[in-house]
Amino acid sequence: MKIKIGLRKPSLRRRIGARTSIKRQVVHRAGLKKPRGYGWVRDPKKYVYNKVYQRTTFDIFKLIKKLLKKQKK
C-alpha cells in the first residue's frame, strides 16, 4: 500500500458518502459504536494506515481556515 504525502485532494462525493453510508447507520443504530481511539480494536491494519496518513498529509480546507484566522487577529 502506498501512502500519500502532502496535500489531500478534496472529494465532495466521498464526504457525503461517509456521512450517509448504510454501514455507518447500521452500526450506529445497533449500538456497536466504540469510544474514540478504539479503532484499533475493530481493524488494526486500517487504524495504523489512517494514523500515518493523517500525519503525512494535510487538508486544504483546514489550511485555509488557519490562514483566515491569522488574518483576523
Image (cartoon, grey):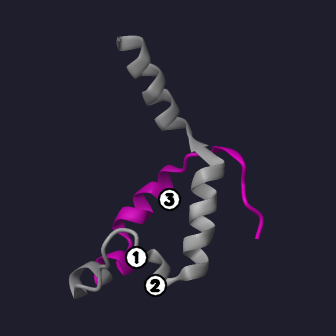
Q: Report the number of numbered marks.
A: 3
The residue located at (66%, 50%) in the rendering is 56
Does 22 lie within the magenta span? yes
Where does residue 50 sit, x and y in percent of width and height?
Answer: 57, 65
- Label 1 sits on residue: 38
Crowding at mark 1 (Cα within 10 Å: few <14, some 14-19, many 20+): few
Mark 1 and mark 3 in contact? Answer it, CB < 8 Å: no
Q: Nearer the viewer, residue 73 or 24?
A: 73
Residue 25, x across and y down, in percent: 29, 77
Provide residue 15's location: percent of width, then percent of height: 45, 55
Q: Residue at point 59% right, 43% down? A: 58
Residue bearing the label numbered 2 = 42
Q: Which residue is mark 3?
A: 14
Is 3 on the left or on the right of 16, as rendered?
A: right
Q: Which mark is residue 18?
A: none
Q: Amino acid at mark 3?
A: Arg
Question: Which one is earlier in the sequence, the residue at label 3 or at label 2?
Answer: 3
Q: Which residue is found at the position 60% from the left and 71% from the top? A: 48
What whole-number distance in Å separates the C-alpha atoms at marks 1 and 2? 7 Å
Q: Residue furthest right?
A: 2
Q: Amino acid at mark 1?
A: Tyr
Q: Are marks 1 and 2 in contact (CB under 8 Å)?
A: yes
Question: N-terminal of the two: label 1 or label 3?
Answer: 3
Mark-to-mark CA distance, 1 and 3: 23 Å
Image quadrant of residue 27? bottom left
Q: In the image, which residues are magenta? A: 1-26
Of residue 49 and residue 59, the one placed in the foreground of this image is: 49
Which element carries disc 1, helix, strand or loop? loop
Q: Quadrant of residue 52?
A: bottom right
Between the residue at mark 3 and the residue at mark 2, the CA separation in whole angstroms equals 21 Å
